[in-house]
Image: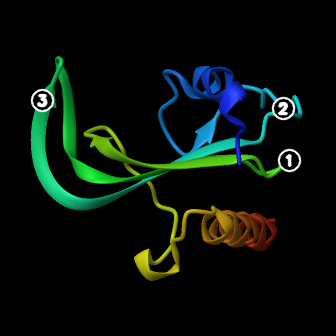
Amino acid sequence: MVPAESEEEWREAFEGARGLNVPHACPFCGRKSLHQYFALHHSQPLVQAGRSFAGRGSFWSWCSQCRRYQHASVLVPEWWNSSLDVLDGELTAEPGALEEALSVGSRQISNEDENCS
């Protein structure tokens, strides 16, 4: 978990990031291993403060290296799209299922690259 006194710094690392892999360094370990994931639970498009949302859902932000994370109920941005293969029933507040899906996806991409050689 991210300690309460570090939440602002954590959120800033994800500010403006779009997509699963976040290009900024983790404020705790300094590695570029940050990820974010949204799960849409209730599709109900809306615009709030000039921003478009697909509906209500959940949000995870985490670091694959130091294992810090946050989880929250949020409005899912309309731009969100991910090919990460994870079942809703596997999701918990901790990002373990998401991290596993990331590593499986990485192994599949690596195997495909080897087969193309």
* Residue placed under numbered mark 1 in the picture: 66
Say whether disc 1 or disc 3 marks the residue closer to the N-terminus: 3
Left or right of 60 on screen, residue 46: left
Above or below — where is 90 with respect to 52?
A: below
How are the colours assigned in the image? rainbow
Q: Is residue 116 visible?
A: yes
Label 3: how many residues lie within 10 Å, few (<14), some (14-19) or many (20+)? Answer: few
Looking at the image, which residue is at 76% across and 70% down?
107
Q: Which of 13 and 102 is in front in this view?
A: 13
Disc 1 is placed on an element classified as loop
> Residue type at mark 2?
Phe
Label 1: how many residues lie within 10 Å, few (<14), some (14-19) or many (20+)? Answer: some
Left or right of 46 on screen, residue 88: right
* Residue placed under numbered mark 3 in the picture: 47
> Residue type at mark 1?
Cys
* Residue placed under numbered mark 2 in the picture: 28
Residue at the front extreme of this rendering: 4
Looking at the image, which residue is at 62% across and 42% down?
21
Image position, residue 108 (x, y; %): 69, 72
Asked if the residue at tag 2 contacts the one at tag 1, i.e. Cβ–Cβ closer than 8 Å, the answer is: yes
Image position, residue 34 (x, y; %): 70, 40
Disc 3 is placed on an element classified as strand
Count of marks placed on residues: 3
Say whether disc 2 or disc 3 marks the residue closer to the N-terminus: 2
> Residue type at mark 3?
Val
Looking at the image, which residue is at 70% across and 26% down?
5
Above or below — where is 80 with respect to 25?
A: below
Q: In which quarter of the image is residue 31?
A: top right
Q: What is the CA distance from the residue labelled 2 to the residue labelled 3? A: 34 Å
